[in-house]
Image (tube, rainbow, N blue to C red):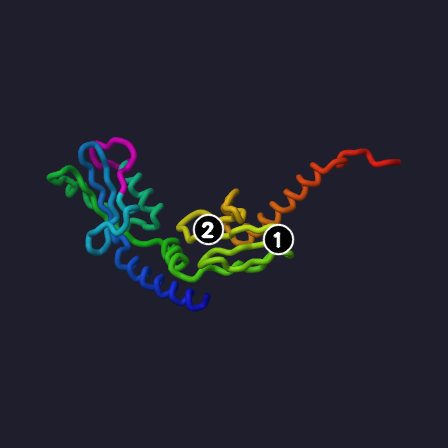
Amino acid sequence: MAKDDDGRMQVLRQAKEVEARTRPVAAELAVKDGAAVLRLLDRNGRVGASRYRLTLPGSCNGISGPVLTLAGEFIAAAGFRLDGGWTDPSEWATADGEAARTALDVTPEYLAYVERRYGPPPSLGERPAGLTAHRNGWSCWQICYQNRRFFELAWTARLTGPEWTLSTSAGRGATEHESAQDAMAAAVERVHASDTRRAAQEPGHDAVPPL
């Protein structure tokens, strides 16, 4: 496992270098034929990933304040912010329609996401009593409660939203959680809830006890 981890870390270090080279440093908003297309460009003027090119929803006949606001919301959702603002409206006219540009700056949240994505998986931390955990892959664990119920716990770095996913050993009933501790607590609660349902279905459960 240690040798495999070393190999994985080498791959991640190389991928992190690629991310830094292709990270967006500018945005271009172009309007043509009733559609507004936003592109986030790297230092070479290229779109480094498919998620950095999108057509804004709705029809658009030209660049306006609401269109720029919507573009800014998508830029923020991608982990960036405008650096200096959009170009002057007098520069928008082009042979193919209108186009505005702005420099971009990366947000602290995006940088933190990069460190998580290209770094080692986090530790599970303190575990509930009766629960064991064993690595079952780079960022996956098999967890077991009281040596009788097994679950799969997986971690995936995300810019926003929960990063931990808990599912049964068969891959069913997946739920997302903010932390490993929340996910492990949910596993324990699932077992207790299952025990309660099973006890309620046993013959004589509702029977009146003898006097």
207 lies left or right of 188? right
| Quadrant of the image occupied by residue 62 | top left
| Quadrant of the image occupied by residue 115 | bottom left
Which residue sits at x=52%, y=51%?
152
Q: Which mark is residue 80?
A: none
Q: Which residues are magenta?
A: 54-66
Please state the horizontal and vertical placement of residue 104, each as a whole percent of the image.
27, 51
Q: On screen, 60 above or below 24?
A: above
Residues at marks 1 and 2, CA–CA distance in whole angstroms = 22 Å
Label 1 crowd (10 A; few <14 / some 14-19 / many >=20): some
198 or 211, which is in the foreground? 198
Magenta stretch prevailing secondary structure: loop
Residue type at the position of mark 2 = Glu
24 lies left or right of 146? left
Which residue sits at x=22%, y=42%?
29
Please state the horizontal and vertical placement of residue 193, each as a whole percent of the image.
64, 43
Earlier sequence position, callout 1 versus callout 2: 1
Residue 1: in magenta span? no
Q: Which part of the image, by quadrant, shows the C terminus?
A: top right
Please state the horizontal and vertical placement of residue 139, each as a whole percent of the image.
46, 57
Count every numbered label the image shows and give the total.
2
Label 2 crowd (10 A; few <14 / some 14-19 / many >=20): some
Residue type at the position of mark 1 = Tyr
Q: Secondary structure at mark 2?
A: loop
Q: Which mark is residue 163?
A: 2
Residue annotated with mark 1: 145
Question: Mark 1, mark 2: which one is toward the viewer?
Answer: 1
148 or 154, which is in the foreground? 148
